[in-house]
Amino acid sequence: MAYDKFNTLRSTAVPLPIENVDTDQLIPARFLKATERVGFGDNLFRDWRYNADNTPKKDFVLNNNIYSGKILVGGKNFGSGSSREHAAWAVYDYGFRCVVSSFFADIFRNNCLNVGVLPVQVSPEFSEKIFAAIHADPTTELEVNLPDQTITLVATGEKDTFEISPYKKDNMINGFDDIDYLQSIKPEIEVFASNLPL
Amino acid sequence: MSNTLFDKVWDTHVVRKIEGGPDVLFIDRHLIHEVTSPVAFLGLKSRGIKVLYPDRTFATADHNTPTINQHLPVEDPLSANQLKALESNSNEYGISYWGLGHQKNGIVHVVGPEYGITQPGATIVCGDSHTSTHGAFGAIAFGIGTSEVEMVLATQCIMQPKPKKMRINVNGKLGIGVTPKDVALFIISQLTTSGATGYFVEYAGDVFENMSMEGRMTVCNLSIEMGARGGMIAPDETTINYVKGREFSPKGEAWDKALAYYKTLKTDADAIFDKELTFDGSTIEPMITYGTNPGMGMGISHDIPDAAHAEGGATTYAKSLNYMGFSEGQAMIGKKVDFVFVGSCTNGRIEDFRAFTSLVKGKHKADDVTVWLVPGSHIVEAQIKEEGLLDILTEAGFSLRQPGCSACLAMNDDKIPAGKYAVSTSNRNFEGRQGPGSRTMLASPLVAAAAAVTGVVTDPRTLIEELV
């Protein structure tokens, strides 16, 4: 599914300094029953964000209006557990274009790249710096530069670099997806399939 | 050049390597279910693409299906709609569809192996992280997102960077009451929930060699819970005996050819892994989790560790124990249990019900515990009856439900109520996993059985001695 191209992003950020945030928290299973990709943002972090009676939980960061922005900063091992792409859809649909963490779970990272959310893995030290800066000043801005593969604390100029494969980087910058590529090599795939051991 | 089992299977399936990018990996077998496939089919429709190889994809309904009264219409309109979408999409694109009521319906990772869809040396994917289960056969099997489901439908390929390789060796004799589930929970507790992220794991050593296919599936199933994309075990006689003659297994000449391929599927003696770990199987106890990720497990006789000895920051650890209503230093033995769930792609196979039944035989279900026994498939259900297990279970006050994922992720009505405690043979103890506010303790079918007859967390070894 098409997503908006990503080049550079300058934004305030929402801090979630919890480790091992799993995709069941990002979107609980009972909200996976749609047959279309619509409305998942409403249920992002559903059970951390709302009480059982659907009133907002005041102490959860998404309900605290001093924090906002297109960047979500999570703790270590972000996105573990279930392969549900709905978790990445919920992140995107809520309005985040970038998730920052010192460590990502594999499948979530892959899913993000496939739906237009940029996973930015920074060093544990830089992650701490970001959390401290936002804690001190919720209007702290971050700048994510995909072509240069850097993330910068705008106020101080402190920066870190992040990894992304040249292929995926090109896709994100141009809004392409893997199916476009795979479709283009279909004849090669069909020849390959006819020569398999099984 | 020396190669690992993983290298051999992976490299055999690489259609093309992209400079500075992922490998284009050919997928032999693709499993789909109702929850993660509808949007993939929508994508195909909007692009006007056909399914390239419909006979390589198999559909079963399992995640949100009811486990009672399966002959009646599904009451929840959203679930019913998703099931209908799977059926109509399968029919439209010529994909085998095993819906509710179909003899082959069941949990995708239980029926795949049962019908021989799972083959050694194959690449297998499904929009479900526990696809790692199929690695038990020496396949490369892993979970994918919905965009990738669409890719496989359209081109039978996905694009993946090749993971690093880890070997986990467990040798020694397992103690009484120690099951494959305990071996897996032990390994995860040692590695933490992210300790194998970025790796594909090979399990080696006599503990795995001596396991049945069911046991190996339990172990490989849980690979994702330490962050690994998948885990695999080299095929041997046990594997080949299991695979041979199943409906979708190769036959005749094709079998001979397949057998020759299967025999190449082992790690060469001097192959190098990026990481290698070794554990002594004789030190493993029956395990139980006390927190909100599968890495937060320990031997059942231990006390809950303090934050200083736990993985994750102090804030995260406190949040986790607070959710569970537990405190540092407490014993798990004796804790109240409200629900027991036996089932799921982790422990919903015949061996699991044999183990459960062996322990409850001649005892009775504790009065204030609700017990859900959910077979993984109709074959498992039939075996439970044929082997006389159902009679023993009925005598002990238990009943059997119908196949499905059930309370493992509580997408149907099988939900643990808020604040209640469940001993569950499933795979995840995340907050709310088994229903909003539910509190899950992961364990083996034997630990589940011990809880079911006592109403509290109980070391199964105290009840087993009379059995040996």
Image (spheres, coloured by chain):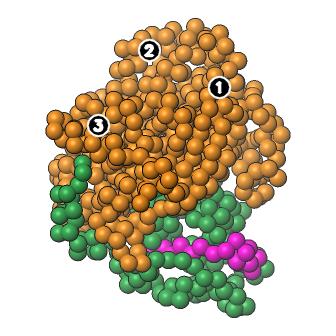
Q: Residue at x 34, y 52 (%)?
A: B123
Where residue B175 is drawn, which disc sits there?
1
Q: Position of residue B142 (x, y in %)?
A: 42, 52
- Label 3 vs 1, first from the N-terminus: 3
Is circle 3 on the same chain as circle 1?
yes
Q: Residue at x 78, y 57 (%)?
A: B314
Where residue B390 is drawn, which disc sits there?
2
Foreground residue among A102 and B291: A102
What kind of element bears circle 1? loop
Residue density around tag 2, few if under 14, some if 14–19, many if 20 or more, within 10 Å? many
The residue to which callout 3 is attached is: B116
- Label 1 vs 2, first from the N-terminus: 1
Q: Position of residue B413 (x, y in %)?
A: 47, 37
Q: Position of residue B372 (x, y in %)?
A: 51, 27
Q: Which residues are magenta?
A: A115-133
Measure the alpha-carbon separation of dots 1 and 2: 27 Å
